[in-house]
Image (tube, grey):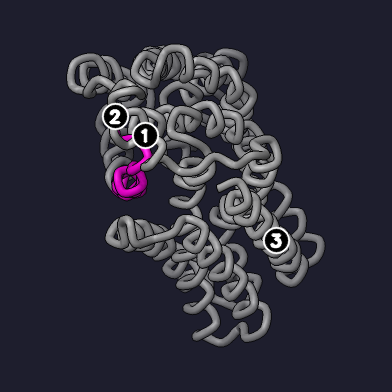
Amino acid sequence: MLAILGPRIGSELHLSNEVVFLGLTVMMTISALCGPLLGRMLVRHGAAPVLVTGTILFAAGFGLLASAGGVVSYLLGWAVMGLAGTCGLTTAAHTAVVERVGAESRRSLTLLMVFTGLSGAVFLPFTAFADQHLGWRGTLIFYGCFQLFVLLPLYLFVLPQRTAPNTDHSLKTADAPKVPVDTRRAFLLLAAMTTLSAFTAFGLSPLLPLLLVHSGASQALAIQLASVRSVLAITARGLDFLLGKRGNPFVTCMIGLCLLLVSFVLLIGFSPAMPAFIGFIAFFGFGAGVLTVSRAVLPLAVFSPTQYGLQAARISLPQNLAIAVAPVIFTMALDRGGVGAMLGIASILIGLSVLLLILLWRTVRQGA
């Protein structure tokens, strides 16, 4: 959203670009810090009331941003958006799916992520169109009304009731995933692995054009190749959906991590050759898409469906904090050490993720 509205917001409110985009950091930080609270809310109340609360908070956040007159009111609006994101985005939505489908939720989660991956392709052009005709304040008011008059009724009246644990066949012992004996160890391994992989994938993604330019690509080529990444990521999610029950979330995650490592080797070893640029984007795009799905479904493979919301929310604390600071860290590495330093750090982090995934896999198998 800020990629389209940010310049106009900054110009009218007399804010620098750094302050404008600081709003996203405020939102991500608050969402991360509220992760443990979200887990307790999901266990106590279920996902539907949490999603309803998130929708109302989103409407309030959009309203505050639309009425902002300076830096304080602007950042206050983003703070409310952070609370809204805690209740109304990924973790709560995924928990709603698991509550209704149970242990067989993987395909449903993947399908949901295919649609969320397409959201940027739909709403970025629409935001630009609305900005031209309504202005940035009118666009934000429209999105607030969309929350209240479209999403809120859907959550209240269309979302199916969750299945009771004692009646859902997918939650019976024979069908549910085995829970590791050492749950604490499994949680720590899963949280560390997903945090490191998310730090790397989300940290590099917004910097892909800059990374390609520093590797020898032209500005135009870098932008064209970087724009293909999101399409490849969505394609990877679609392929994972087609695999369905035949896929293993641990194997899928390992494939995603290995694809990222291959992409780094290609760019470090063979740039500025054109095949290196194409191969880097192809492997990185598919790998990042596969990892996005894996981060959503791995908690379901490690813990029981009734634990999914609590554990996923707890994992979101370090993961969202890592995502918030990752672009800054990688930008510093690129500026001070060049492409080699940046991708060297990324390779080490993904290598550690591979080791953590192997340890997690062994822990789950031992507890089965």
Single out the mark in the foreground, 1 or 2: 1
Q: Residue 232: x, y in percent?
A: 38, 64
View extreme (right): residue: 336
Q: Write down the residue under mark 1.
A: 172
Dot 1 or dot 3: first in sequence order is 1
Q: Are marks 2 and 3 in contact (CB under 8 Å)?
A: no
Q: The residue under label 1 is which amino acid type?
A: Lys
Q: Is residue 222 left or right of residue 99?
A: right
Q: Write down the residue under mark 2.
A: 168
Q: Quadrant of residue 142?
A: top left
Q: Residue 112: x, y in percent?
A: 31, 43
- Tell me the crowding category of disc 1: few under 14, some 14 to 19, or many 20 or more residues within 10 angstroms, Cα based: some
Tell whether position 299 is magenta: no
| Numbered disc 3: secondary structure | helix
Single out the mark in the foreground, 1 or 3: 1
Identify the residue at horizontal 27%, vertical 33% (top origin): 130
Q: Residue 74: x, y in percent?
A: 54, 19
Say if residue 15 shows up in the picture.
no
Residue span colored magenta = 100-121
Q: Quadrant of the N terminus?
A: top left
Identify the residue at horizontal 54%, vertical 56% (top origin): 205
Q: Does 280 sit above or below residue 254?
A: below
Q: Write down the residue under mark 3.
A: 355
Q: Does 270 sit above or below residue 79?
A: below
Q: The residue under label 2 is which amino acid type?
A: Asp
| Numbered disc 2: secondary structure | loop
| Numbered disc 1: secondary structure | loop
Identify the residue at horizontal 51%, vertical 31% (top origin): 11
CA gap between label 1 and label 2 equals 7 Å
Q: The residue under label 3 is which amino acid type?
A: Leu
View extreme (left): residue: 158
The foreground one among 129 and 332 is: 332
